[in-house]
Image (cartoon, coloured by chain):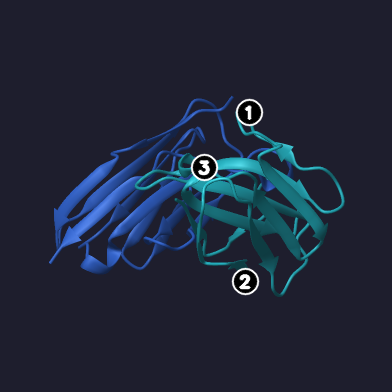
Amino acid sequence: GAVVSQHPSWVICKSGTSVKIECRSLDFQATTMFWYRQFPKQSLMLMATSNEGSKATYEQGVEKDKFLINHASLTLSTLTVTSAHPEDSSFYICSATPGTQAWDTQYFGPGTRLTVL
Amino acid sequence: TQLLEQSPQFLSIQEGENLTVYCNSSSVFSSLQWYRQEPGEGPVLLVTVVTGGEVKKLKRLTFQFGDARKDSSLHITAAQPGDTGLYLCALGGTSYGKLTFGQGTILTVHP
């Protein structure tokens, strides 16, 4: 099956620094990638939709200047948390899909645990 | 905005018991997916449905989809500790495969 990887799997940083998380589709080209945020014992909350070569579409309430998304190729999207604060600590998950239809399968990465001290 | 209600939020049961998780939408959905997620990992797709009235089985898991395409259920028979995890339903229905997730059900199966 299709595999999506994330790097790093966990990161600890100081408040005020920036952190970059990578999401890669390993064996398929991802037309679209999605970034989610998940707090403990809660569901996934979509942050933004990323299409290769174009600007990401952010969900309401998500600061685009704080969560920078770059989708430079069909196999790589990055999420940069700028000027991180403790409240940004969360589990960040990406997913990728090779299609554009509503029922196309999304393949999820294993997630990145961010802890901001 | 299409709303998705998932219940119950928490289930704590003994090994061998049966359980059902429900997912209801405020409007008709074009596709619905069920996922299972273990702590510290990404969600894993269990099943996708696009046809109203459909029943799918995956070993001890039975997925039912309402004729009106507004509700779905996940039934687990003879639950085992390995079934413990977060179960999520998710709606498709928009372009580019965007999903809307339910609140999730945290299932704990005690040996």
The three-letter amino acid code for the residue at tag 2 is: Val
Mark 2 falls on what kind of element? loop
Question: What is the quadrant of residue B36 in the picture?
Answer: bottom left
- Mark on residue A85? 3
Q: Residue at x 66, y 62 (%)?
A: A23
Residue B8 screen position, x and y as percent:
28, 39
Mark 1 falls on what kind of element? loop
Judge depth for marks 2 and 1 and give the one in front.
1
How crowded pointer 3 is (Cα within 10 Å; few <14, some 14-19, many 20+) is rated as some
Q: Looking at the picture, tell me which residue is in the foreground, A28 or A67.
A: A67
Q: Is residue B81 above or below residue B104?
A: below
* Residue B90 relative to residue B30: left or right: left
Q: Is residue B74 above or below residue A12?
A: above
Judge depth for marks 3 and 1 and give the one in front.
3
What chain letter is assigned to the residue under label 2?
A
Q: Looking at the picture, tell me which residue is in the foreground, B92 or A23.
A: A23
Q: Residue at x 24, y 60 (%)?
A: B77
Asked whether the residues under the numbered discs 2 and 3 touch, taking CB atoms below 8 Å apart as contact, a structural biologist would say no
Mark 3 falls on what kind of element? loop
Asked whether the residues under the numbered discs 2 and 1 touch, taking CB atoms below 8 Å apart as contact, a structural biologist would say no
The CA distance from mark 2 to mark 1 is 29 Å
Q: Which residue is mark 1?
A: A60
- Mark on residue A3? 2
How crowded pointer 1 is (Cα within 10 Å; few <14, some 14-19, many 20+) is rated as few
Chain B on-screen colour: blue
Chain seen in cyan: A
First in residue order: circle 2 vs circle 1: 2
Q: Quadrant of the N terminus of chain A?
A: bottom right
Badge 2 and badge 1 both on one subunit: yes
